[in-house]
Image (tube, rainbow, N blue to C red):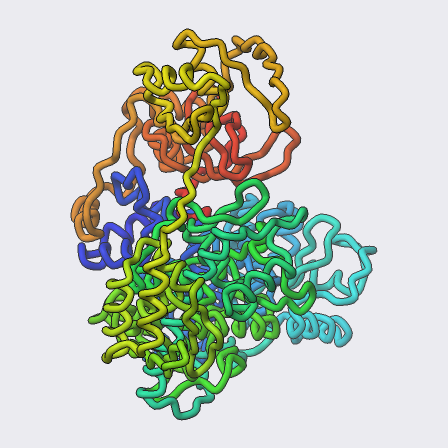
């Protein structure tokens, strides 16, 4: 297939080739293919084909299924008749499949990508078995001769290949098949027609073999059923289609189903968008502050328990569902991480971000996060938050399908609920679920997440939702976030009873100011804060001045401060700092003031930053062990004392071990690595590949030729990817069979070649592992493995 596919690629224009590369970016992963033949091999690989196939909508999947039922190769007219499609719909769907390389036309026929021909989904295409071209080659020449005779076909010769060709031609002739079945005895004819309708043999007992008597012996002798080994007989797809009759049509749904909608005025959507966006940023900051002050602890089984989740929600003022989502997003962004069994902010999480940047980061992370934190599983319920086992790599595709279904709604209308999206989502991404009945809780979880983030409001996409769905080309996500937060309420009503009222969702900057200077008392449509001694002191402790606090509050209120509030701020500022508390690491005590004065003046002890607390006490900025070491180095003879004043006994340090530490490949770059130069656009790569050979490239360099000797079972393209990964240290995916014969899939990086072994960092085991090259069954770009 690869040669013919490569020939078809060679006939594409530069623009058509560039369009194909845009649809299939996995095929251009480093090292970039050097010929059209190598590109054809990558485009035909099972993982690449399936990655492109799962992104197809329902009519594309149905088209491919019909072509698989026809044997993987069929005339255009036959496919069009089987689908019963209108010419325009047929042409549109075919063009979409051709653009992503899953179907290609050649010699007047349509060819399906090889990995899809045996139909890896369900029991078979259209409920049929495999084609005769897959089933018959396993039969003996004697069996093929009997089939040819039963069908009434004249073989061109007596060799097995000639008998196989004649048998395939006879079974592909629908009229001949119907005539043969019509001449069958009544009982056998009924059994065969039942199998054709059902797609399988239902009452097989396992007692009959080819050539023996039994209810299916007549059909087995004519190839209408084929029995592989001891398994149940199978009906070739061509036979089942012929017996279903010329009026049979495969399912084909070219138009997306409608979604139940209700009025969603733009002004209402915009207002809720602003409120939800401001609330999301405010609550995320509150969650980060809460985890910094009181880090929640991890369950022994992993994740965050319900008790800690409720405690965090109570401290931050958010709902449990909202806090669950913010924790997941913060962890996915790298803002929170487990440290000594507790969830604490990382260095990035401790750094404040402007509100618009925070919102943009949250929305973008949510779109690509491979988890569904708000999913209520019908069998297992909702698991612990941040449980490492709750991983769903299809979550980004599900979110994209939900947003895409909402993007097609007319202006001023919104979906009435997540249940209205089930049909539209399963049409847009039919391979997400084995059964559409499983979809509702998943769609409901995405709906709730989108509402909390402000991506969805009143069943309609907001500005950030439209950007994510790709329907707002003129606006970036950053611009949409800025617009949302600017629309939030930026005014506060300051009252004489030392309260502040915000009559709407507060803008993040206003919420941050009030959270610093006052204590929140209520949330809702209007939020209320109360000023007090402790809250104003908190702002002064954070480095704010009384003048700065007054000016910020006056700017937010648009008027002078009420007299009680101004007096409170001035009074707390006047008393602030009357008593100071200084940190010290240890104290040096001595009954001789003169000796302490000598130590305080000693130039060699300046690094201790000594301060006199009393005539007999000095304070040191260094801990006890460092202070003792410095004093001894200066010629003094000090001794450490415990909490009770008793001298500390210092034990000799353990003898150091001279065993070298185990080296780690994490973060190490192999010597001689280099960054591959890459064309900037698919157009550049298309220009380079256009006109090259449809054959695979030769392995001229020494490393490539050496890899060919080590791994002759791998294709040229796979060996090139493996050599590139060894040279550059970049990640690569492998299908591997271990010493026990168990297959596994790994992503490895920082590879070192010690023939015949590969020593690499394994992401699955999070450790260095050794792999035998002979056990590597396939090599794939890492982008297809994540």
66 vs 116: above or below: below
388 or 359: which is nearer to us?
Answer: 359
Q: Residue at x 29, y 68 (%)?
A: 481
> Which of the 4 quarters of the picture holds residue 569?
bottom left
Q: Name the outermost residue toward the bottom.
A: 263
Q: Residue at x 59, y 62 (%)?
A: 311
310 vs 248: above or below: above
Q: From the viewer's perspective, is 566 left or right of 620? A: left
- Whether residue 696 is visible, yes or no, is yes
Give the image location of residue 465, x and y in percent: 35, 72
Give the image location of residue 193, x and y in percent: 68, 74
> Which of the 4 quarters of the picture holds residue 385?
bottom right
Numbered circles on residues, count:
0
340 or 586: which is nearer to us?
Answer: 586
96 or 289: which is nearer to us?
Answer: 289
Q: Residue at x 49, y 47 (%)?
A: 337
Q: Residue at x 24, y 80 (%)?
A: 559
Give the image location of residue 393, x and y in percent: 50, 55
Give the image location of residue 316, x and y in percent: 50, 65
68 vs 269: above or below: above
62 vs 744: above or below: below
> Which of the 4 quarters of the picture holds residue 711?
top left
- Whether residue 389 is visible, yes or no, is no
């Amino acid at each position: 297939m690869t040669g013919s596919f490569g020939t078809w690629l060679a006939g594409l224009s530069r623009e058509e080739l560039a369009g194909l590369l845009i649809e299939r970016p996995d095929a251009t992963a480093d090292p970039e293919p050097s010929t059209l033949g190598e590109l054809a091999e990558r485009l035909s690989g099972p993982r690449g084909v399936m990655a492109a196939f799962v992104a197809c909508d329902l009519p594309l999947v149905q088209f491919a299924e019909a072509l698989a039922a026809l044997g993987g190769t069929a005339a255009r007219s036959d496919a069009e008749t089987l689908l019963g499609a209108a010419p325009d719909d047929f042409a549109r769907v075919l063009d979409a499949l051709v653009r992503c390389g899953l179907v290609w036309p050649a010699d007047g026929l349509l060819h399906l990508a090889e990995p899809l021909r045996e139909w890896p989904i369900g029991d078979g295409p259209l409920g049929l078995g495999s084609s005769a071209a897959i089933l018959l080659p396993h039969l003996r020449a004697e069996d093929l001769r009997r089939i040819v005779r039963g069908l009434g076909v004249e073989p061109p010769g007596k060799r097995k290949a000639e008998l196989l060709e004649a048998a395939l031609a006879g079974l592909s002739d629908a009229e001949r098949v119907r005539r043969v079945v019509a001449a069958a005895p009544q009982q056998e004819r009924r059994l065969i027609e039942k199998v054709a309708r059902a797609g399988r043999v239902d009452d097989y007992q396992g007692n009959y073999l080819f050539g023996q008597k039994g209810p299916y012996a007549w059909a087995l002798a004519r190839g209408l059923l084929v029995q592989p080994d001891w398994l149940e007989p199978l009906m070739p797809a061509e036979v089942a289609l012929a017996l279903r009759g010329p009026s049979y049509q495969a399912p084909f749904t070219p138009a997306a189903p409608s979604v139940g909608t209700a009025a969603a005025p733009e002004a209402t959507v915009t207002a809720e968008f602003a409120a939800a966006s401001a609330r999301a940023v405010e609550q995320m900051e509150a969650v980060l502050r809460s985890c910094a002050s009181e880090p929640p602890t991890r369950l022994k089984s992993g994740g965050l328990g319900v008790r800690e989740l409720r405690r965090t929600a109570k401290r931050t003022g958010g709902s449990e569902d909202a806090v669950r989502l913010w924790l997941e997003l913060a962890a996915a962004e790298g803002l929170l991480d487990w440290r000594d069994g507790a969830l604490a902010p990382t260095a990035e999480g401790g750094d404040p971000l402007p509100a618009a940047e925070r919102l943009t980061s949250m929305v973008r992370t949510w779109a690509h996060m491979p988890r569904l934190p708000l999913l209520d599983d019908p069998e297992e319920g909702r698991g612990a938050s941040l449980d490492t086992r709750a991983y769903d790599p299809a979550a980004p595709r599900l979110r994209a399908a939900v947003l895409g279904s909402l993007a097609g709604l007319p202006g001023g209308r919104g979906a009435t609920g997540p249940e209205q999206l089930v049909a539209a989502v399963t049409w847009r991404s039919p391979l997400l679920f084995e059964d559409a009945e499983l979809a509702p809780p998943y769609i409901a979880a995405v709906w709730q997440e989108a509402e909390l983030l402000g991506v969805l409001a009143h069943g309609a996409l907001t500005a950030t939702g439209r950007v994510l769905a790709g329907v707002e080309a003129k606006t970036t996500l950053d611009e949409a976030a800025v617009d949302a937060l600017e629309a939030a309420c930026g005014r506060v009503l300051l009252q004489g009873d030392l309260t502040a009222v915000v009559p709407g969702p507060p803008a993040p900057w206003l919420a941050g100011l009030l959270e610093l200077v006052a204590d929140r008392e209520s949330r809702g449509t209007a939020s209320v804060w109360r000023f007090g001694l402790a809250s104003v002191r908190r702002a002064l402790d954070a480095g704010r001045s009384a003048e700065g606090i007054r000016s910020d509050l006056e700017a937010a209120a648009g008027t002078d401060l009420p007299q009680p509030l101004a007096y409170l701020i001035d009074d707390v500022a006047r008393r602030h700092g009357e008593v100071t508390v200084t940190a010290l690491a240890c104290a040096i005590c001595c009954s001789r003031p003169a000796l302490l004065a000598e130590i305080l003046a000693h130039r060699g002890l300046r690094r201790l930053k000594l301060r006199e607390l009393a005539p007999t006490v000095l304070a040191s900025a260094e801990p006890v062990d460092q202070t003792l070491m410095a004093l001894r180095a200066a010629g003094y003879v000090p001794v450490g004392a415990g909490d009770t004043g008793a001298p500390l006994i210092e034990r000799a340090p353990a003898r150091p071990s001279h065993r070298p530490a185990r080296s780690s490949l994490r973060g190490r770059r192999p010597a001689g690595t280099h960054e591959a130069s890459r064309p900037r656009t698919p157009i550049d790569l298309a220009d380079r590949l256009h006109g090259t050979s449809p054959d695979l490239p030769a392995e001229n360099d020494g490393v490539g030729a050496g890899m060919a000797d080590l791994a002759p079972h791998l294709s040229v393209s796979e060996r090139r990817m493996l050599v590139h990964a060894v040279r550059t240290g970049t990640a690569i995916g492998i299908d591997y069979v271990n010493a026990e014969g168990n297959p596994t899939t790994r992503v490895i990086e920082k590879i070192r070649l010690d023939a015949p072994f590969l020593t690499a960092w394994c992401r699955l085991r999070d450790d260095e592992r050794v792999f035998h090259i002979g056990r590597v069954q396939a090599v794939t770009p890492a982008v297809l493995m994540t």
